Amino acid sequence: MNVESRYQPLFEPVKIGPVTAKNRFYQVPHCTGMGHALPRTLAAMRGMKAEGGWGVVCTEYCSIHETSDDQPYPFASIWDDGDLANLAALADQVHAHGALAGIELWHGGSLVSNLASRLPTLGVRSMPGRADPVQSQPMDRRDIRALRQWHRAAAARAKRAGFDIIYVYPTHGYLLSEFLSRGLNGRTDEYGGTLENRVRLVRELIEETRETVGDRCAVAVRFSADGHGDAHLSGDEARDVLAMLGDLPDLWDLVVSDYYGEEMATSRFVQEASLEAKVAYAKRITRKPVVSVGRFTSPDTMLRQVRSGILDFIGAARPSIADPFLPTKIREGRLDDIRECIGCNVCYSYNYRGAAIRCTQNPTMGEEWRRGWHPERVTEGDGSSVLIVGAGPAGLEAAHILGKRGYTVTLADAAGEPGGRVTLESRLPGLAEWARVRDYRLGQIKAMPRVSMYLGSPLAAADVREIGADHVLIATGARWRRDGVGRWNATPLPALRAESTLTPDDLMRGAQARGNVTVFDDDHYYMGPVLACLLAKSGAIVTYVTTEGKAGQWSQYTGEQERTQQQMLELGIEIIVSTNIDGFDGECVTLACTYTGRSHRRAASTLVLATSREPCDELYRELVGPDGESPVVGIQRIGDCRQPALIAHAVYAGHRAARELGEPIERLTARRDRSVI
Ligand code: ADP
Ligand code: SF4
């Protein structure tokens, strides 16, 4: 059996009410940080998924009315005909490749703050929102009638915009889940009390959406298969809701109650297909098709979901971001070409920074319209020679794209193995999947005869000159600082006992630390917490000190903060927040409160500093000389040696340098997506 026919069941058409998806690959709604603000960017990105073979491509959460605005996060909206026109462009691009377009109609209820519209937020009762010190207005019957009208109007607009699948969205804590909640919904009318009453509004919206658009569009419901926690909607009640509504919608899009801990969890905490046990029962209750997610990247896992009758559609957000062409690659049997999601949630984090989506694995994500980047196609180069120094994520990605463009590439690395920081970091607890960043690129390069890689090859400036390549890319990375300089400390800490101070690089290269270890985290992302866990697991007594208010504070954006802190506490790590380090003498660290400056000493035999990194740019600087004017033709530095940042930044930098090499200047200008008066 060849690969293609083996996975054939994944390419069967599936009927969803009045429409038919051409295959089982379903891009579920996912936020993009583009929404209403960047309509051309969004349309091109969704269109790319359709081009890559997804049978269904959905929008993100799409507000039905100005009483639901999620500013500063760039949500989608379908409030008026202007929104309709923008969304129609998206639906057109999805249709151009034979996919169905889905739209997730949404009302945020009490969770949002309406920072833009300044209208009161609406809730099943008055309660505080997610982020701001404002409470919602309790909805009366008139408000409910208005909501139903807004939903109808939004559905009608969505149909006019060309959408094929229209969602009713009673989950993720938004307005309709407030109505479902036993704890929150204290209404004494027909919308409160019994489960049947609490479901009434959802039922009405499904029925009214069908009445409004059901002749041509399917109605989908996104629902949490195991409820919303016992205080709100227990697992048993969720089953009852599914049974009550059973065949009313045309499709069930199932999620689970634990959003950050499970549904959207990173690969540090959750593996592929993790929702299976909680959603599998649904197919026994409804005859309608079911889609669910599970960060599916393995075609065999996908096949099993379908064959064993768990799912009709393979739902994906992140795998479709990392590889918009995943379905095409499976269909063509090009499994080694799949760019597998690493489960880092960098894509998700930027929505919560108010910026357009990006992806660690797929540097073209979000750049389809602005820079015209295609995830699979590049322009032909002139075949000249390029030397790349450093085979970390930046160097590997540059080699991959330059090789694809037909350049003759020499890739040299001082280390005995490729991958740079990715190789080192992927050995840390929970980060194994990050090695996919390296492995995908190595796999691609292997098939390129004009790309040669030399490991164990430290290059000095003289070597670079001697090699005499037409272009040189320096991708020599960054090193963690040993002197305490970071966000909080602008100058080196004066009293550090160097012999007992370790950096993340030391630990990743095998240094051991026993006894009382203090990990100082002034970086605020994963490195400090992950190292603290590594040390605790190896038997050290670990104290974690951070200048922020929580462990791994920035990882709130990747949705990992809670699990991070929970994991550390479970490992017995003491967490000290809002605290700086003033000194370390090998026996004690001096800790200082970031608010009062009050200090005290604590026993510590080793201090680990996860503060900041400095670029390893010595080679670059030697080659370009003091004024940055290089005698070496076409030299650039890329990745961490230019700007220490996330792995996603390094991959992007490598990609951009490789894509733009030798291109005429007019092709290098990025377009700006904005409204112009
Ligand atoms: P990035 O994230 O920017 O790709 P990394 O730190 O992951 O950076 O990788 C940088 C790589 O560069 C490392 O594998 C390192 O061994 C290599 N390197 C650094 N300096 C030299 C040099 N002078 N010659 C060859 N390789 C080097
Ligand atoms: Fe996957 Fe990370 Fe890309 Fe998101 S950013 S799609 S989690 S690889």
Image (tube, grey):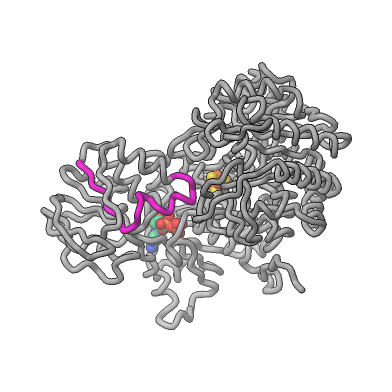
Per the rendered image, the range of residues in magenta is 541-560
Is residue 292 visible in this depiction of the protein?
no
Name the quarter where the C terminus is drawn.
bottom right
Quarter-of-image position of residue 113 = bottom right
Q: Position of residue 512 (x, y in %)?
A: 22, 44
- Residue 555 included in the magenta stretch of the image: yes
Quarter of image, res 592: bottom left
The percent coordinates of residue 476 (x first, y second) are 42, 61
In this view, the residue in front, 42 or 468, is 42
Please determine whether, in this image, residue 674 is positioned above or below residue 114: below
Q: Nearer the viewer, residue 259 or 649?
A: 259
Q: On the image, which quarter does residue 124 sit in?
A: top right
x 75%, y 49%: residue:
47
Q: Is residue 505 left or right of residue 43?
A: left
Exactly how many numbered labels are in the figure? 0
The one of 79 and 540 positioned closer to us in this rendering:
79
Residue 309 position within the rendered picture, expressed as x and y whole percent measured from the top left: 66, 19
Nearer to us in this view, 258 or 512 = 258
Q: Is residue 613 left or right of residue 30?
A: left
Q: Residue at 56% of width from left, 51% of height from top?
A: 359
Q: Quadrant of the N terminus?
A: top right
Q: Using the image, determine if residue 156 lies above or below residue 295.
A: below
Residue extending farthest to the right is: 215
Residue appearing at x 67%, y 62% in the figure: 381
